[in-house]
Image (cartoon, coloured by chain):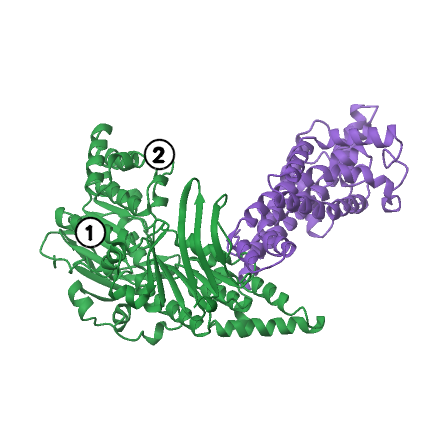
Chain colours: A purple, B green
Amino acid sequence: MSGLRRLLARRLLLGAAQTAAVVLLVFALTEALPGDAAVALAGDRPDPARIAAIRASMGLDRPAVERLADWAAGLAHGGLGTSLASGRPVSTYISDGFGPTLLLAALTLALLVPLGVGLGVLAARHAGRWADRLVSSVTLGLYAVPEFACGVLLSTVFAIRLGWLPPTAVGYGADLAAHPAVLVLPVLVLLARPVCTLARLVRAGMIDALASPYVAQARRYGIGGARIRYAHALPAAVTPAAQQLARTVDWLLSGVIVVEALFVIPGLGTVLINAVAERDLPVVQGLAVVFGVLTVVLNTGADLVARRLAPRAEVAA
Amino acid sequence: MNTECVAEIDGLRVEAGGRAIVDGVRLRVRPGTVTALVGASGSGKTTTGLALLGEYPAGARVTGRVRAPEGLVGYVPQHPGAVLNPVRRVGALLWDIARTQVRHLPRRERRQAARKRILHTLTEAQLPDGDALLRRFPHQLSGGQQQRVVLAQALLLGARVVVADEPTTGQDALTKRHVVERFAALRRAGIAVVLLSHDLDVVRELADDVLVLRAGRVVESGPAARLWSAPRHPWTAALLAAHGAAEPAGPDGGAGRAVLRTGPFTARHGRTAVLRAPALTLRTGDSLAVVGRSGSGKTTLARCLAGLHRDHDGTLQLDGTPLPRSLRARGRGQLAAVQYVFQDARAAFDEHRPVLDQVARTAVRLRGLDRGAALAEAVATLADLGLGEDLVRRPPDRLSGGELQRAALARALLARPRVLICDEITSGLDTVTRRGLLDTLTALRRERDELCLVLITHDLDTAALASRIVVLDGGEAVEEGATRDVLKHPQHPFTAALLGTTAEPAATSGRG
């Protein structure tokens, strides 16, 4: 399949260029912010002489282009540089933050796919009847609630009023897997909107597929209802859902800032917020590289899945 | 006789939207025979056929008796590709059917047994290389292969009755012969075939019994031979007369002034050359038929002339002045001079505006008439083509396929074209409607001697209207000449095969 290989090569090359563009943009934007790491470090005593001294010791007095070039040269040797704030390698920030984020994302995804697809199929199967109306109106209503509102609401009710679950991950360290109770509320908040999108996409696709001539033919020839739904109709219905799923996974892995901040989870989102607050440019750039690569890889993967699911489209570029 | 019927319908009445689509139909289907339901579009053929499968239009009121072997009726629709799941490999449904048949076996042996059954059935359906075929997707199959796969589904099911809906409509003569072969094989296997068709050639070759339907009622039924030799009902007689009574070949032409001239050219899609066209000259009063199988490059040739396909290296001349290759580069007068009527008339109209407005628009856009004058001319032209004013004030979905095709013709004529290109405008119409449209074209050719007709067709009755014929095969012009000569004394074996006078050439036997 040289066509497939060519497609992959083209997509990855394009992705590398896109990632580079993202890094440049992030660099430019962070430069444009007032203040820098030196100001942040000087903290409560913003004595200009002291700031200048810190700036000189960090090399921040050099021109921006030179600093970017240095960082890029480091990248070429496989290093993401060192933090301005702590002097630790940026890679340790990322590996520390990646654990909790990955855990949350994996849990959310494991629940999201069966739930979203199941609800979508259920609604499509009873299209127009009460089960469909219930699923459709609940998903629409839930989708309208933003993460922060949903998070605050859930934690007020279940953590503060009822006291069933811990309100934040403070005090549980980085090993969240050992304390599943901590994860319940964040995962619920992360699930809420993606489930709605996925269910609605699957429902729309399934309604079309169930009305198609090929499903009618399978029915005619005595194939069982479940087999028709999951083996004949669903494959045709999930193409748009697969692409949407890639976007959701990307969103989850980039550390959902609102949720991590709300529940104080030490994931990538928290690392990013802190790095921006401290104007810790190397860390911000390192994260931009990681997020860029993740986005490219996930979307390329989704396109490959879509290519398999819609073999006629021969998805290009 | 009743005892040997595998399926029967008695007094079937299907009512939808307050109108009876089928009324009082009685049908007996015997094993090992072909029962044909013939009639114009909308006569109730498909509704009757689907009743054997227990399927009715949504919200229909059904009375009468239908007896058919439950779960053992196969269905081959007009477009077999539609019942193959585009995202699953072609074997998907075959596997599911076979799986239900091997449940009695121990779990380990099931897969192998199912596979054996499927491959055996595919061979029966004339698909020898089953293993490779099962791994392909529907769009990687030819139309003929798709039809055979759908037939294989019915065979694997063990169907005792197979309902085939218009299996040959829109196919060229060679493909038709393959289809006829396929259904003859079913009959030999003892399966009852119910053939829904308005293609009388095929009905005549295959059918043992024929039912003639009109507006939902059976007007005549009986053994095919009797029906053909002595039709009892005037409608049957009309249907049979409309078929085959081809016009004598048109005048030779060639004497008038050259209207459109092209040099020999090669047209490409991307990097592939799809057509090598010969030099063509169209003179006033001339008409040219471009004949060939599907995929032979007929439409590409027409699109090159019309400026719809510009990826070619030829030069076009209209009245001695160069005509730009692309539609975008042509002026108003040049656009008006070359008009195109498409195969799918329904798709060529905006469904929300009255037909009349859309027809009149041509004269406003291309000839600069004001709206009133354009409407008046449109009404007159449409009336000439047999479409009354109250009819054309309706939106397109209230007109039949044949009526819309006339309206499309009128729309093109309102540009006062010098060259009128008709792309398969008679395919997909039933015989009576087709005959009517052909008569219209004949009259046009006679009355408007400034007009050059280009007829793109695979139907030789239609081609017979033209004064000259070009035969295309695989993107090459294999024969060109006066219609009379080409139809009577074909020089190229492919033309002969298309005419059905000799066995088909071996080169094309793998297709279809």
Q: Nearer the viewer, residue A315 or B501?
A: B501
User: Which mark is on residue A83?
Assistant: none
Tag in front: 1 or 2 = 1
Q: CA distance from mark 1 to mark 2?
A: 28 Å
User: x%, y% of residue A302?
Assistant: 62, 51
Give the quarter of the image for residue B112: bottom right
Q: Amino acid at mark 1?
A: Asp
Whether residue A16 appears in this view of the structure is: no
Relative image position of residue B487 (x, y in whole percent): 20, 67
Badge 2 amino acid: Arg
Q: Which residue is labeled 1 in the image?
A: B439
Q: Position of residue B37 (x, y in %)?
A: 37, 59
On the image, which quarter does residue B212 sit in? bottom left
Is residue A161 depicted above or below A80 in this figure? Answer: above
Instruction: Please provide percent x and percent y for residue A82.
Output: 78, 43
Q: Pointer 2: what residue?
A: B353
Image-based side of B81 in relation to B215, left or right: right
Which chain is home to disc 2?
B
Q: Nearer the viewer, residue B292 or B256?
A: B292
Q: Could you tell me if residue B110 is visible in this image? A: yes
In the rendered image, which quarter is residue B399 located in?
top left
Q: Residue furthest left?
A: B255
Looking at the image, residue B482 lies above or below residue A267? below
Element assignment for label 1 = helix
Mark 2 lies on a secondary structure that is loop
Q: Earlier in the sequence, mark 1 or mark 2?
A: 2
Which residue of the protein is positioned furthest toward the front in this rendering? B2
Quadrant where the N terminus of chain A lies?
A: bottom right
